[in-house]
Image: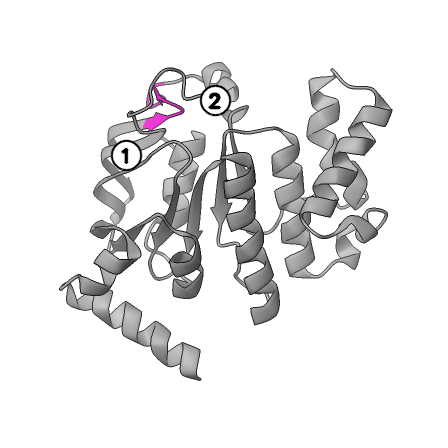
Amino acid sequence: MGTNGHPQAPYIEFKDVSKSFGDNHVLDHVSFNVMPKEMVCILGRSGVGKSVALHHIMGFMKPDSGRVIVAFEDITDFLEEDLERIRKKVTMVFQNGALFDSLTVRENVAFPLRERGELSEDQIFQIVDGLLEMVGVKEMRDLFPAELSTGMKRSVAIARALAAQPECVLYDEPTTMVDPLMAQLLGDLIKRLKLQLGLTSVVVTHDMRLAKKLADRIVFLHEAKVLFFGTYPEMEKCDEPIVQEFLKLDELSLEA
């Protein structure tokens, strides 16, 4: 999994992207990029267009204006069959896990491997057990999603995303609605996977601690615009009042 001969080109890039739903401007001339093997966190309060940005990367939504580059290709005008090719390289871990309720944990993770149709059942189960061990839920392989906590479901969803052997993983609010210990474990897992597998990663979150732990760079969205794009140390020095307020609020919640 090289960089297709584009070592300096961004793997993902938003070029002046705008998106509205009626009168609601969700993304307003948004520009940022993600380099190969980099982890970028999209940070901001709820409802500022963070998840909408992920949906543009997956091609589920099209921008009203601007261009979206994914896996070094301009996907803005792609048809569904071209997007399917891109989605073999870029996969998303949805907030709700999006697991199949009627399948066990093991069967859920095996699903993308079976779809490819290239492996024997023995090979599939070896890979699945390895992935479940990697994300720390191997002993739960015979349980159904309804029997798992929210955090465990997220871990299984991450294992299933990795089964597709992607170059890039998008995480939508991975630590929302999980307890602080599980949030820490998920954060550690996401970081470890990036380092071990050389993945390009985008994490949407409003959790400053997670962003600080994971991000090579941070995109801070506020009222549909990018208020800040850079490293965490640069963010601490940013003189934008709303960015400073966000950092201070997080310090307060840490002390609480």
Q: Alpha carbon of mark 1 to alpha carbon of mark 2: how far?
A: 16 Å
Spot occupied by residue 161 in the image (x, y as percentages of width and height): 61, 37
| Residue type beneath disc 1 | Phe
Whether residue 179 is visible to the viewer of this picture, yes or no, is: no
- Which residue sits at x=86%, y=47%? 142
Q: Tell whether label 2 touches label 1 (CB within 8 Å).
A: no
The range drawn in magenta is 69-77
**Mark 2 element type:** helix
Camera-side residue of 210 and 80:
210
Residue occupying image coordinates x 56% and y 39%: 196
**Percent coordinates x, y for residue 229 in the rendering:** 24, 49
Specify the quadrant of the image occupied by residue 249.
Answer: bottom left
- The answer to whether residue 74 is magenta is yes
Location of residue 145 in the rendering, given as x and y in whole percent from the top left corner: 75, 51
Out of 228 and 193, give the one closest to the viewer. 193
Callout 2 amino acid: Ile
Q: Which residue is mark 2?
A: 86
Rendered image: mark on residue 14: 1
